[in-house]
């Protein structure tokens, strides 16, 4: 499968949502794999701060620094031809709106990110607004916030209780109004993710968020079966039974775009 050589932009993602199409995202941390993903038709390369665990060997994403993110974004940017590059704002790099602006600018200017991702709900609205007003694209990451794992006490599904679900829906609206360009929902019940996706004009990327989001992201190492320990429920080993990484990624892109992955067995209720 050869993807169309058209560059993916935020406008592409918005148009896909309006047309009811799906888009495929994967994490990327280095040039060699980013090249394979890009060639296989992955629409968004997420330079996720999961690199702290998967590349650096830390227990959480908390030790990842802005300089780490810039370094890995740069590696990915050198290989990318078509996909949109989204880069994580690491732990506390958006603690104030002014810090968010300065650090997001570095990720874009020095790293080559096209869009930054910020973890947090309404508390991040002022930062998102400032970035949006200054022309920096933002993805707002809601649901399970891995940078808050020490407060949450573990990686758990979020938004199961009625009040928590209402709060998440409200957060999505507040962040859309603040100027977010994309939403990402991590580990939320499938029905709630579907309600949020239907309630916003923004493209919504899901991970552990059921079948109804506009786009899907997986951690690359999970879907290649490299992650040590138990694979998360919402992932699948796409490499098993295939001839190589490129074939596995092509199958992932095909399955997401055809609405075959994720299936109900990958969702939380
Ligand atoms: O850092 C990351 O890889 C992420 C995904 C889990 C969505 O944010």
Image (spheres, grey):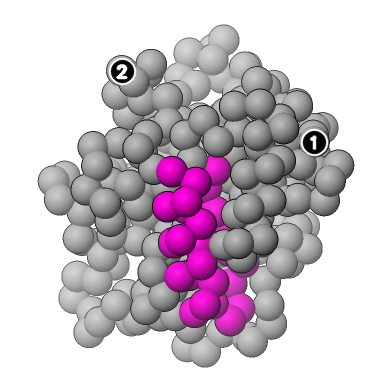
| Image position of 125 with respect to 139: above or below | above
How far across and how far down the image is residue 188, in percent? 47, 31
Q: Is residue 10 left or right of residue 87?
A: right
Q: Is residue 231 magenta?
A: no
Pick the residue in front: 235 or 93: 93
Q: Residues within 10 Å of mark 1 (few under 14, many from 20)?
A: some
Name the quarter where the C terminus is drawn. Answer: top left
Q: Residue at x 60, y 54 (%)?
A: 107
Foreground: disc 2 or disc 1: 1
Q: Which residue bears the numbered disc 1?
A: 130
* Residue 250 visible: no
Q: Is residue 83 magenta?
A: yes
Give the mark nearest the N terminus, 2 or 1: 1
Q: Is residue 195 left or right of residue 252?
A: right
Q: Residue at x 46, y 61 (%)?
A: 71
Measure how far apart labels 2 and 1 are at the Cα level: 31 Å
| Image position of 42 with respect to 125: above or below | below
Where residue 27 sits, quadrant-wise, is bottom left
Q: Which residue bears the numbered disc 2?
A: 153
How far across and how far down the image is residue 223, in percent? 30, 61
**Badge 2 element:** loop
> Extreme right residue here?
133
Q: Tell me the magenta residue range.
A: 65-89
How far across and how far down the image is residue 21, in percent? 65, 63
Q: Residue at x 57, y 62 (%)?
A: 111
**Badge 1 element:** helix
Q: Which mark is residue 247?
A: none
């Amino acid at each position: 499968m050869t993807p169309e050589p058209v560059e993916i932009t935020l406008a592409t993602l918005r148009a896909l949502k309006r047309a009811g199409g799906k888009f495929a995202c994967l994490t990327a941390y280095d040039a060699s794999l980013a090249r394979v993903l890009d060639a296989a038709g992955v629409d968004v390369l997420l330079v996720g701060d999961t690199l702290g665990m998967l590349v650096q060997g830390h227990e959480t994403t908390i030790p990842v620094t802005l300089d780490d993110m810039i370094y890995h974004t740069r590696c990915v940017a050198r290989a990318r031809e078509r996909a949109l590059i989204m880069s994580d704002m690491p732990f506390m790099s958006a603690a104030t709106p002014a810090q968010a602006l300065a650090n997001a600018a570095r990720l874009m200017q020095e790293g080559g990110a096209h869009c930054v991702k910020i973890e947090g709900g309404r508390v991040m609205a002022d930062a998102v607004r400032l970035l949006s007003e200054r022309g920096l694209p933002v993805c707002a990451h809601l649901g399970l916030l891995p940078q808050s794992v020490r407060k949450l006490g573990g990686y758990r599904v979020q938004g199961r209780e009625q009040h928590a679900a209402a709060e998440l829906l409200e957060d999505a609206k507040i962040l859309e109004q603040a100027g977010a360009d994309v939403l990402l929902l991590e580990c939320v019940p499938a029905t709630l993710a579907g309600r949020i996706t239907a309630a916003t004009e923004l493209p919504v990327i899901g991970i552990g968020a059921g079948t109804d989001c506009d786009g899907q992201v997986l951690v690359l190492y999970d879907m290649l079966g490299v992650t040590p320990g138990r694979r998360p429920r919402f992932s699948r080993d796409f490499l098993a039974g295939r001839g190589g990484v490129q074939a596995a990624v092509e199958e992932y892109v095909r399955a997401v775009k055809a609405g075959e992955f994720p299936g109900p067995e990958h969702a939380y209720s």
